Image (spheres, grey):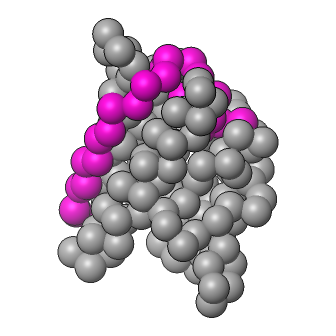
Amino acid sequence: MGDLTLVVRRHVRASPQALFDAWTRPELLIRWWGPQGVTCPEAEVDLRPGGRYAIANETPSGTLWIRGEFLVIEAPNRLVYTWRVGDDGPNDQRVTVRFEPREDGTEVIVLHEHIADQATADDHEAGWQGCLEGLAVWAAVREG
């Protein structure tokens, strides 16, 4: 198990409920997920403790799946789940997403734990920054 932890945050002009739904409903998730250059053609979500999820990340070089299991669901404020990239990657990483209400939107805070090394942490940070940018754009278009 890795010992690196990453925290990425972004203010998004939408309610915690709207963002929780965007994170947990496949038909919404595929609209915003992925950093630049990555699309999400397919997502599966079984939103219950012990339920599984799978998110396709399509790049020019192919499709890579992110999979895991939900550990904690506290709608609309917090999700905790395991995280594994690919079919043979380590399955001990954990992601906590908090949706904290603010006067003009929501602070989305992603805590990614048990990362094996700095290079992987750097990749995850870029990925999460891109995902949160996509979420903010989705929320702005949705409101517009």
Residue 62 placed where, x, y %?
A: 67, 85
Residue 119 placed where, x, y %?
A: 26, 79
Q: Quadrant of residue 58?
A: bottom right
State the count of labels: 0
Q: Is residue 81 left or right of residue 122?
A: right
Is 111 magenta? The answer is no
Residue farthest along the top direction in this orientation: 103
Q: Residue at x 42, y 37 (%)?
A: 97
Say above or below: 105 vs 5.
above
Say above or below: 98 vs 75.
below
Q: Quadrant of residue 11?
A: top left
Q: Which quadrant would the C terminus be assigned to in this image? A: top right
Q: Residue at x 58, y 69 (%)?
A: 38
Q: Residue at x 25, y 54 (%)?
A: 6
Range of the magenta residues?
A: 1-25
Q: Residue at x 54, y 73 (%)?
A: 37
Say above or below: 126 vs 101.
below
Residue 117 seen in this snapshot: no
Q: Is residue 52 left or right of residue 78?
A: right
Foreground residue among 43 and 94: 43
Residue 97 seen in this snapshot: yes
Q: Quadrant of residue 102?
A: top left
Residue 72 placed where, x, y %?
A: 52, 31
Foreground residue among 96 and 49: 96
Q: Is residue 61 left or right of residue 131?
A: right
Foreground residue among 130 and 54: 130
Residue farthest along the bottom direction in this orientation: 61
Q: Which quadrant would the N terminus be assigned to in this image? A: bottom left
Is 6 magenta? The answer is yes
